[in-house]
Image: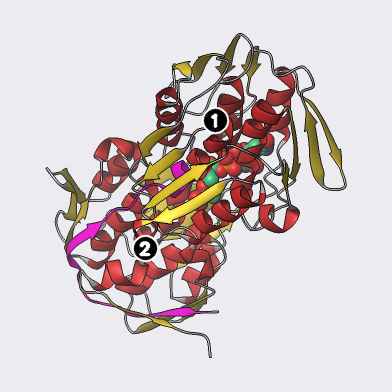
């Protein structure tokens, strides 16, 4: 397993390109299952999760071609060979469960392994199941797999979600595009990735209104066509790299970044004395007056503070002047970066869903271990600011969600390199 070695203390200056959104792409790719015509995605991020989704779709009989060094993915599912998403793929990536809705809509059946727990929480699928049952599917859990059938096809319905689940909204949205009649998703997730998926589905001929609000209305159609669609910029990668100059004291412009995708996050950076500016080419970030102010943060569904930026924000607040509180309201176990940051000299106390961070003068480099995707990058950020060397192990977590992280950071002056496992 590779590690990443960082020699901290260098203020970063320059430009970091922001890639297409992993979490948009992982929902857009299964949409190919809804049509027999080709679906081509551009601005695709080069990530291991995208490769995993490609393998899953190929196992179902979809032709998937990665072009232009992986930035373009051309898919065609004119003939499906299977409607079973195996455990060995699904356990590696929960987003594999996003084939459930499209397979049910296209084939009238689907067998999808339950993803199983992951580092950050149990992450069940009850909301997905309830929503698809509301559309007329019969779903049974057997041998760790969800066996779903819709013998006479799916029928439009009112679908109230008990929680604004991103994945359940995406599965229901895709299934409803081919259901008979009208579907209304209530308490739908409002993430930009949902809007990006709806935009692509409309290009395919779907009739969708209200995406981006908590009430989405879908008028089912008989069939969908193909389309070509650019993946939206990754707001989580953007937020992550906005924190790099904030934590090191330099100035960086995140090319392709859109401030409207990270409003609540940017408000917290402003409160922490970080200057954030939308430019013609992206988002420029630097410290306002040399110090970082303590702030309180509570994660929430979009447009609230993203849970996927909580770990990274904690890294920044470790050297803030004063005491900060971070409340994680989405996942039950998403503070595993805290003990690793503590190894670097951070003062963090975790009680239930709240972490209290008392700022220290300077972090000190140390060997630390990545535990999940966003925790791993928070350790990289801490290492950029820390005195001395930080060695982050198990960086396969990182490669799931950040393309060429050491190249992007080296280009703005970071002393960072990948150390291949011996
Ligand atoms: C998506 O996961 C993202 N992944 C996650 O990003 C992100 O953290 C999450 O949304 C919240 O924003 C992708 O888009 C591929 P949820 P998802 O369904 O859809 C509970 C990353 O780092 N829940 O909104 O799985 C669940 O346990 C990843 O890129 C149920 O109880 O998230 C969690 O506590 C991590 N039952 C909460 O809801 C269900 O049926 C939010 O889950 C579904 C979810």
Q: How far apart are marks 2 and 1 (CA)?
A: 53 Å
Quadrant in which the N terminus appears: bottom right
Residue 46 among magenta residues: no
Judging by the rendered image, the residue that carries numbered circle 1 is 35
Where disc 2 sits, the SS reads: loop
- Residue at the far right: name it: 143
What span is colored magenta in the figure? Answer: 2-25
- In the depicted view, which residue is nearer to us: 97 or 303? 97
Q: Which callout, 2 or 1, points at the residue further toward the start of the chain? A: 1
Judging by the rendered image, the residue that carries numbered circle 2 is 359
**Ligand 1 falls in quadrant:** top right
276 relative position to 169: left or right: left
Residue 330 visible in image: no
- Residue at the far left: name it: 280
Mark 2 sits near ligand 1, with its Cβ under 8 Å away: no
**Picture layout, residue 347 above or below residue 209:** below
Residue 23 among magenta residues: yes
Q: In which quarter of the image is residue 231?
A: top left
Image point 70% across, 25% down: which residue?
A: 132
Image point 52% across, 69% down: which residue?
A: 396
Residue 406 x, y percent position in the rendering: 34, 72
295 relative position to 329: left or right: left
- In the depicted view, which residue is nearer to us: 348 or 71? 71
395 relative position to 154: left or right: left
Residue 187 x, y percent position in the rendering: 55, 21
């Amino acid at each position: 397993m590779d590690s990443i070695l960082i020699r901290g203390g260098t203020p970063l200056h320059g430009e970091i390109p922001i890639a297409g959104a992993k979490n948009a792409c992982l929902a857009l790719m299964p949409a190919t299952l809804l049509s027999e015509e080709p679906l081509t995605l551009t601005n695709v991020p080069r990530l291991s999760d995208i490769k995993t989704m490609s393998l899953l779709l190929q196992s179902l009989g979809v032709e998937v071609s990665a072009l232009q060094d992986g930035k373009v993915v051309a898919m065609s599912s004119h003939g499906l060979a299977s409607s079973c998403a195996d455990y060995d793929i699904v356990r590696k990536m929960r987003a594999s469960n996003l084939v459930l809705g499209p397979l049910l809509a296209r084939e009238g059946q689907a067998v999808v392994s339950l993803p199983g727990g992951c580092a950050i929480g149990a992450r069940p699928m009850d909301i997905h199941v309830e929503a698809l049952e509301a559309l007329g599917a019969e779903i049974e859990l057997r041998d760790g797999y969800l066996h779903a059938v819709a013998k006479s096809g799916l029928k439009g319905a009112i679908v109230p979600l008990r929680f604004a689940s991103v994945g359940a909204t995406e599965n229901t949205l895709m299934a409803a595009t081919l259901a008979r009649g009208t579907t209304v998703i209530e308490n739908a997730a409002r993430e930009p990735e949902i809007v990006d998926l709806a935009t692509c589905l409309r290009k395919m001929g779907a009739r969708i209104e209200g995406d981006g609000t908590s009430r989405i209305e879908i008028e089912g159609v008989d069939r969908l066509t193909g389309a070509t669609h650019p993946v939206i910029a990754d707001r989580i990668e953007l937020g992550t790299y906005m924190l790099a100059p904030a934590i090191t004291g330099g100035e960086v412009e995140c090319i392709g970044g859109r401030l409207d995708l990270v409003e609540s996050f940017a408000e917290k950076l402003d409160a922490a004395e970080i200057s954030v500016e939308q430019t013609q080419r992206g988002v420029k970030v630097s410290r306002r007056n040399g110090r970082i102010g303590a702030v309180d943060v509570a994660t929430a569904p979009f447009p609230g503070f993203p849970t996927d930026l909580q770990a990274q924000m904690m890294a920044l607040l470790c050297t803030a002047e004063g005491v900060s509180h971070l409340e994680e309201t989405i996942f039950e176990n998403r503070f595993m970066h805290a003990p690793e940051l503590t190894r670097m000299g951070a003062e963090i106390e975790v009680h239930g869903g709240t972490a209290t961070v008392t700022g220290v003068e300077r972090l000190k480099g140390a060997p630390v271990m990545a535990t999940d995707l966003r925790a791993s990058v928070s350790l990289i950020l801490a290492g950029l600011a820390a005195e001395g060397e930080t060695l982050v192990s198990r960086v396969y977590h990182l490669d799931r969600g950040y393309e060429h992280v050491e190249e992007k950071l080296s280009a703005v002056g970071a002393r960072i390199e990948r150390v291949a496992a011996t």
